[in-house]
Amino acid sequence: MDKFRIRSNDKSGIIFDIGIAYTKIGFTGDNGPIRIIRTPSELFSEFKDKIPTLRNRKQPSDFKEAFEEGEKRLTESQIEGNNQLPLQKSETQQIYEQETFVANSLQNIQNLYEKLDIFLNQLFYYELLQKLTNKIIYICKNHLIPHEFYDKLGAILFNKYEITKIQFVLNNSLPLYITGQLSGLVVECGYYDTQITPIYEGFPLMNCLITSKCGGYLINKFLKNYLLKDNTNINFQNIDFLQLEDIKFKYCKLLLKNQEDQYNINEEMITKSKQTLIPTSLIASQIEQPVQLEKSQKSQQIHQQKIQLSYYTSTKSLSQGLFGNVDSDEPNIAYSILQSLQKCDPSVAIKVSKNIIISGGVASTRGFYERLRQEVLFQLDNNPQVHDVKYLKKYLSFTRINYPPNTLPWIGASIVNQLNPNEKYCITIEKFRQNSSVIPDIFGNDYVYMLNQTSKDQEQGNEADDII
Ligand SMILES: Nc1ncnc2c1ncn2[C@@H]1O[C@H](COP(=O)(O)OP(=O)(O)OP(=O)(O)O)[C@@H](O)[C@H]1O
């Protein structure tokens, strides 16, 4: 990739794409960030701590036991005063529900200012090594991240680093710039969610935006659960983010739907795929915590033991995290894409489906494109809920871009800088202070405003500005 890296001499702007899992930073005019680093987990630790742990309950073996279990949980939930549903839920369902919890508790970030301050300090003084005076900062804004996050970021940049101007760019529109077209469907598969945004003639159609819980986090959750079951003699309880990511990148692969179905056809085949092991170079000591090793009587043995990843775990964790069963209300990217197209006017849907751009780290998963294409067609053919968009089948076209998918929003922001940046989306230090140290909601309210404005403009025969 580095062979194709363009480094411009223009260092007048710095582009930030602070993702929940990874932060991409670099200079305007380049065709890729100079650093991709892990966004510190402390930045969001408050909401992480609130993730409820799965209770390790024995699965009931028959209906009577399930019923009794349900009764017991009902009594418990009444005593504890929690709202948990009394009936035994499938483990998968419990994992999906935790996701909602995580997204909601993003609102509860405390001490954010201090944490962001430390992180920015690291970025500027250890990663970029740049003087910041007179620099314009471009921030790729994820409009689902709470507003307070950007307010705090703005406060530090303006007050501490004396930045004079920040330009906000909308994360879920940016990859479109790389295709050189004004219309397309941007599918941004991030860590906590996947956002699907149709963009028509330069307008992100926020009323057709669909957010699905599919993302890296859900895959990691499934992967951990399967690993716990796969290797009962290795303790995966303490496996951390980077170790899960490592296993996922190196050994997990999505199969085509028909290939995967072959292994789920009956119990015998499932057992077979659980027993077919992928050779890994990972050994247990890389995963287990030293403290636990000391406690273990067989520490030496476990220390040397190779982690055995089954074929089943490798494929299932990915497919369940991305292409859940729609009939059981599980998130599925393919279905969400079609739901978003369903919301569009047919002429708009035709146009945007000719340029579907997959962006975000999850798109680097091995076998992702092939499986996604197949799942979309499968949903169109078999899911009655999306029959009304079957006419789009002949138009669907996935645009392949030769840049790493996790950098596409960043590169889009770099292109924005080369075009004529819209002053309307710039926040100056004066504007920030006048607005009581709050970043104005330039995309949310403004977009609604523009929608109204468009209809008024049309009546008056005026043309509205493009907002991307
Ligand atoms: N080669 C790869 N194979 C599998 N998964 C990958 C690969 N590269 C990145 N990912 C996954 O993609 C996910 C999202 O990465 P990305 O860099 O888009 O995150 P982010 O920008 O922090 O997320 P968000 O947009 O939600 O803030 C991560 O969980 C990561 O594990």
Image (cartoon, rainbow, N blue to C red):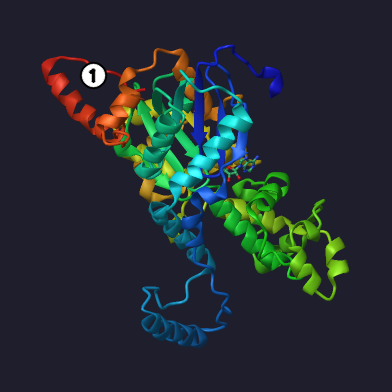
Q: Is residue 99 left or right of residue 146?
A: right
Residue 211, quarter of picture: top left
Q: Is residue 206 left or right of residue 45?
A: left
Quarter that holds the N terminus: top right
Front residue of this view, candidates 108 and 285? 108
Residue 394, quarter of picture: top left
Counting from the top left corner in percent of width and height, residue 109 is at 42, 52
The residue to which callout 1 is attached is: 464
Residue type at mark 1?
Ala
Counting from the top left corner in percent of width and height, residue 118 is at 54, 42
Mark 1 is surrounded, within 10 Å at the Cα level, by few (under 14), some (14 to 19) or many (20 or more) other residues, namely: some
The answer to whether 371 is drawn above or below residue 315 in the figure is above
Q: Residue placed at 74% from the left, 62% from the top?
A: 288
Total tally of numbered discs in the picture: 1
Q: Residue placed at 63% from the left, 56% from the top?
A: 316
Front residue of this view, candidates 352 and 423? 423
Circle 1 SS class: loop
Counting from the top left corner in percent of width and height, residue 232 is at 73, 70
Counting from the top left corner in percent of width and height, residue 43 is at 51, 48
The answer to whether 433 is drawn above or below residue 60 in the figure is above
Q: Is residue 28 left or right of residue 308?
A: left
Quarter that holds the C terminus: top left
Q: Residue placed at 73% from the left, 45% from the top?
A: 250
Task: Please say whether residue 120 is visible from this viewpoint.
Answer: yes
